[in-house]
Image (cartoon, grey):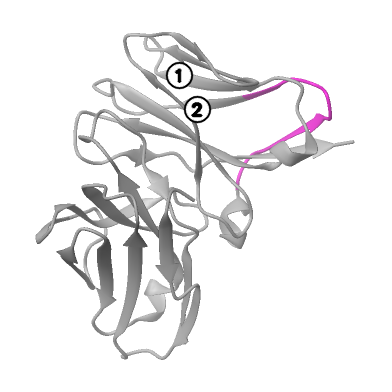
Amino acid sequence: GENVGLHLPTLSVQEGDNSIINCAYSNSASDYFIWYKQESGKGPQFIIDIRSNMDKRQGQRVTVLLNKTVKHLSLQIAATQPGDSAVYFCAENPNTDKLIFGTGTRLQVFP
Amino acid sequence: DAGITQSPRHKVTETGTPVTLRCHQTENHRYMYWYRQDPGHGLRLIHYSYGVKDTDKGEVSDGYSVSRSKTEDFLLTLESATSSQTSVYFCAIRAEGPYNSPLHFGNGTRLTVT
């Protein structure tokens, strides 16, 4: 929604630079992780996922890195574009029916 | 948007009135979810469904009920709306078992309780 960006950490990058958004997850039993992008007034949009038997997965212009030792997840966006401006958040699945969502990071891209 | 339609998109209602939000999917997915999103909080699960007439509570289920009489429709009802239920509500669907695939979300319903 429109207010989801309030009170969130913000990452500001210049168009064309690479962006790295970080997420610390909470449950050591989590074995599946997802990154979402949310634009103002829209629902969260799936970007990429990774399972715990991997430490890296690449998509189109995006890479997710998983460090299970320190329970850390990161999303790298290559050649960031103005259309990448949004709130990004991670989700973890701790072997239950329910995902746990982070609160998100707002990415601002400047020309 | 993964074949998910939420209605209405916006609603203003008064405290104490009943409200029903609808989620309709065209994907024939088994799992459906209702979340609320508020500033300073991640998405919080209200209720979910793992099949027709099969539902379970999430972490913030008090004051909400759900029904799923058909695969494609999942209704969220606020029996007596309160100001604390002012929020943006998202429906989500998932095809496979919980561990195998991501949730896909609708575009939300913005509910204001005055």
Q: Residues within 10 Å of mark 1 (few under 14, many from 20)?
A: some
Write the residue at 41% across / 50% down: B43
Is residue B42 on the magenta stretch? no
Q: Residue B100, relative to residue A54: is it above or below? A: below
Write the residue at 78% across / 32% down: A81
Which residue is the site of mark 2?
Answer: A23
Q: Is residue A108 left or right of residue B68?
A: right
What range of the chain is rendered magenta?
A8-20
Using the rendered view, name the quadrant where residue A2 is placed.
bottom right
Instruction: Name the mark on residue B101.
Output: none
Instruction: Name the mark on residue A72.
Output: 1
State yes or no: discs 2 and 1 in contact (Cβ < 8 Å).
yes
The x, y position of residue B10, in whole percent, is 51, 76
Q: Chain of mark 1?
A: A
Mark 2 or mark 1, earlier in chain: 2
Mark 2 and mark 1: span between their CA atoms? 6 Å
Q: Is residue A111 left or right of residue A63?
A: right
Q: Nearer the viewer, residue A82 or A7?
A: A82
